[in-house]
Amino acid sequence: MAEIDFNCDLGEGCGEDAAILPSISSASIACGMHAGDPSTMEATIALCLAHGVAIGAHPGYPDREHFGRRDLDLRSAELRATLVYQLGALQALVRAAGGRLQHVKPHGALYNRAAVDRTTADVVVDAVHAVDPSLRLYALAGSRLAEAGREAGLAVVEEAFVERRYEADGTLAARSRDDAVIDDVEEAAEQALSILRQGQVRARTGELVEVRAQTLCLHGDRPDAARFAARLRTALESAGHRVKAPAART
């Protein structure tokens, strides 16, 4: 049975985290800059441990007003400092709860910028490596961030999205577009299975785009995330896939 990680961004204060967790294998927890705070981080960690869900950090730009989805032109040193701060804070809370931080996945505009801009990607990679080089790096499949992480010796897990549409170049369609998000759960399930079976996704403009991924992402801030998560878990398992997070590195 082929294994696939099914991850979701949690701890952002706007979703149904407790209802989502039974359906996923890993979670990326907001670290307080784009969303969340120490209390929500601690509560989300406890939920993950209770459900046996692998815990990751979801650091973003320091921009709560725009939920981390506005691109910020930070100096490299400033970006590195805020990333180390966020990763260190979550890692400390995870350890205090008796768990282990297993991966890092940038959020929102930072994720998208690191996917195409090597300078930003290198800063993200440097921050992860400085905090804990055993952490896995979740990055958009085929992106500059994945490339930078591998070159630095990090364990890279390439990621695809089940309810976001793609551009022909393999990047995600901008959220400013009306068709950027897939709101039909059956269409999202079809996209997930296409990625796993054919290694392809159909771009919003019709082209087939190669996408090779080891983890599938669902956004936890959508209002119907729990329903999406349950249906997608069923679709993955019915197609013969075992939903499981990557093993912790030693």
Image: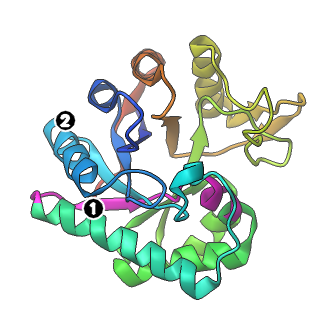
Is label 2 in a helix, a strand or a loop? helix
Q: How is this picture coloured? A: rainbow
| Residue occupying the point 11% across, 64% down | 96
Residue 166: image location, x then y, percent: 76, 38
Range of residues picked out in magenta:
97-113
Q: Amino acid at mark 1?
A: Leu
Q: Residues within 10 Å of mark 2 (few under 14, many from 20)?
A: some
| Residue occupying the point 45% across, 15% down | 231
Pointer 1 residue: 101
Vertical relation: 135 (above or below) 217: below
116 displayed left or right of 68: right
For residue 51, the mark is 2
Can you see residue 151? Answer: yes
Q: Residues within 10 Å of mark 1 (few under 14, many from 20)?
A: many
Going from the N terminus, do you reach mark 2 or mark 1 first?
2
| Residue occupying the point 47% across, 16% down | 235
Residue 191: image location, x then y, percent: 65, 25
